[in-house]
């Protein structure tokens, strides 16, 4: 994958999801139809595995919300590249379903407000956690702008600080009606189905209750291998500062449903926050 002239090309097309538009549309349409009642949401949590494993959860969650003109993407930094808090300040992200423009104006508002964020493309160069969400979002809405943020800090104080900064920008610029936050995370990794379900239920309960402190506690105490704790914690705190009252679990499943192997699974949850 190469970022040239702020053009971010797909990293995992052909691996996590089909590389051609026809095949990609067919796969997503098999998960969830475009029709159905949609609600305004402050944010949503989506899994980021290969579509064969987590696409159903992601698509059925996205199809129930209104995708707004600005989508703030909060993702895990799996690669370790770049600063702890990396925002891509401008450019284009390309997927098989078309190109999406980074909202440079909003990105710069976040940068000017934040003591945490750094303008950076390195963290996004080979990171899949945000990329895999985009085609599903594009399937339900063709045109919107994105603000990609990759996070690798697990310091809850810093995560809350970032959330406060993000919320202040949205409130001060009256952008709540035009902005939705998407946090990307899988849950328990590579444990037996019954253990994954038990652990993930604790994490999901904390998320739905909008309690980032409790989420941090159960992830630590129960040794939950949730790769996106940081972006989810930021989303929870940001959403509360923007007036959110609670979350709703839309769908949960594990990789075992696709693989047939329940001895070592990964958990996936789709959750909306209103």
Image (cartoon, rainbow, N blue to C red):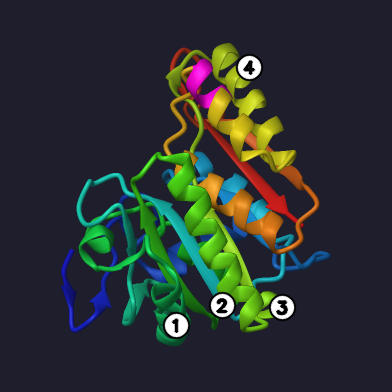
Find the distance from the CA under tag 1 to the CA under tag 2: 7 Å
Looking at the image, is mark 1 or mark 2 earlier in the sequence?
A: 2
Residue at 46 percent across and 18 percent down: it is 223
Determine the residue located farthest toward the right in the rendered image: 37
Residue at image mark 1: 103
Find the distance from the CA under tag 3 to the CA under tag 4: 36 Å
Residue at image mark 4: 198
Q: Which residues are magenta?
A: 218-222
- SS at badge 1: loop
Q: Position of residue 92 (x, y in %)?
A: 33, 80
Circles 3 and 2, Cβ within 8 Å, touching? The answer is no
In this rendering, would 100 be left or right of 89?
Answer: right
Please identify the quarter of the rendering in which residue 200 is found.
Answer: top right
In this rendering, would 213 be left or right of 116?
Answer: right
Residue at image mark 3: 177
Find the distance from the CA under tag 3 to the CA under tag 2: 9 Å
Looking at the image, is mark 3 or mark 2 earlier in the sequence?
A: 2
Residue at 50 percent across and 22 percent down: it is 260
Find the distance from the CA under tag 1 to the CA under tag 3: 16 Å
Q: Position of residue 76 (x, y in %)?
A: 39, 48
Q: Position of residue 117 (x, y in %)?
A: 36, 64
- SS at badge 4: helix
Circles 1 and 2, Cβ within 8 Å, touching? The answer is yes
Find the distance from the CA under tag 1 to the CA under tag 4: 39 Å
Q: Mostly what secondary structure, the magenta segment? A: helix
Question: Where, quadrant-wise, is the C terminus in this rendering?
Answer: bottom right
Residue at image mark 2: 70
Q: Is residue 181 above or below residue 170?
A: above
Find the distance from the CA under tag 2 to the CA under tag 4: 35 Å
- SS at badge 2: strand
Circles 2 and 4, Cβ within 8 Å, touching? The answer is no
């Amino acid at each position: 994958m190469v970022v040239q002239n702020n053009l971010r090309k797909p990293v995992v097309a052909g691996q996590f999801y089909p590389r051609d538009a026809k095949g990609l549309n067919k796969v997503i349409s098999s998960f969830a139809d475009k029709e159905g009642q949609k609600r305004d949401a402050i944010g949503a949590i989506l899994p980021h595995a290969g579509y064969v494993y987590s696409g159903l959860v992601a698509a059925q969650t996205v199809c129930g919300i209104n995708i707004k003109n600005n989508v703030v993407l909060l993702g895990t930094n799996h690669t370790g590249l770049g600063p702890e808090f990396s925002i891509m300040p401008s450019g284009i992200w390309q997927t098989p379903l078309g190109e999406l423009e980074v909202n440079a104006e909003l990105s710069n508002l976040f940068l000017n407000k934040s003591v945490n964020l750094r303008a950076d493309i390195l963290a996004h160069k080979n990171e899949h956690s945000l990329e895999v969400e985009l085609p599903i979002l594009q399937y339900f809405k063709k045109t919107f702008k994105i603000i990609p943020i990759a996070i690798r800090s697990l310091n809850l104080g810093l995560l809350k600080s970032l959330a406060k900064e993000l919320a202040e920008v949205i409130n001060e610029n009256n952008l709540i009606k035009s902005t939705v936050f998407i946090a990307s995370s899988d849950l328990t990794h590579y444990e037996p189905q019954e253990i994954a379900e038990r652990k993930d239920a604790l994490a999901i309960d904390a998320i739905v209750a909008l309690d980032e402190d409790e989420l941090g506690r159960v992830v630590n105490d129960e040794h939950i291998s949730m790769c996106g704790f940081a972006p989810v914690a930021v989303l929870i705190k940001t959403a509360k500062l923007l007036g959110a009252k609670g979350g709703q679990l839309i769908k949960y499943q594990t990789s075992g449903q696709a693989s047939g192997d329940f001895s070592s699974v990964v958990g996936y949850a789709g959750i909306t926050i209103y």
